[in-house]
Image (cartoon, rainbow, N blue to C red):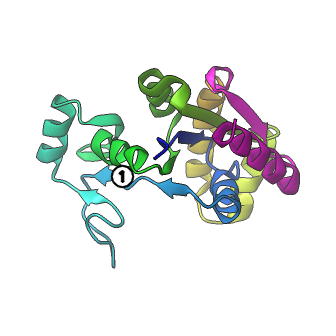
Amino acid sequence: MKQGRIIVFSAPSGSGKSTLIQYLRSKIDNLHFSVSATSRAPRGEEQNGRDYYFLTPEEFRKKIAEDAFIEYEEVYHDKFYGTLRSEVQRQLNEGQNVVLDIDVKGALNVKRLYGQQALLVFIKPPSIETLRLRLEKRGTDAPEVIADRVSKAAFELSFAPQFDRIIVNDDLSTAQAETLQVVSEYLNP
């Protein structure tokens, strides 16, 4: 059985990353998300092992100390999110291609660990101003939240040159076609 590969997507909030990943998964059969771990409590109908691996903050810290994550982040005090090395390795060994939707620092760590077995794709908005307008149009965030996301976007954009591919999402159908081509070529060299 052929070993799977990793495709990592990173982008500022509002860049269209989730839309592009959904499109890609509708066009390519063997793309699977890795189930992440978190120290937050389950919400609604979420189930352990299906939606997340739910850990206590203490369990999460213990796994960090054991180097069990390929990437993780403490988003808020005691609220961790991370990708378990064992989960990704199991999927790769089963021949699955694994899609990760993570932040820029986590993406670079995945590349450091997996080298050519991981493709890093950065989804870039056409401009910071376009990004601000997209976030405002969503109508889901308060102005101060939008300001924080735009500020974070500038930081994230500074990492784009370290990614294998940068796709500018100016026109959705063009970005979809380019994403599909980049990932297809990577999976079928």
Q: Is residue 13 above or below residue 70?
A: below
Q: Position of residue 6 (x, y in %)?
A: 52, 40
Q: Residue at left 73%, top 32%? A: 166
Q: Is residue 46 above or below residue 89?
A: below
Q: Position of residue 44 (x, y in %)?
A: 33, 77
Considering depth in this image, is 138 or 182 the residue closer to the camera?
182
Q: Can residue 171 be seen here?
A: yes
Q: Residue at left 68%, top 41%? A: 188
Q: Where on the picture, by quarter, is residue 127? A: top right
Q: Residue at left 11%, top 44%? A: 58
In the image, which residues are magenta?
Answer: 160-189
Q: Position of residue 104 (x, y in %)?
A: 53, 32
Q: Where on the picture, by quarter, is residue 110? A: top left
Q: Is residue 176 magenta?
A: yes
Q: Is residue 168 above or below residue 32?
A: above
Q: Residues within 10 Å of mark 1 (few under 14, many from 20)?
A: many
In this picture, residue 164 sits left or right of residue 1: right
Main SS category, magenta section: helix
Q: Which residue is mark 1?
A: 36
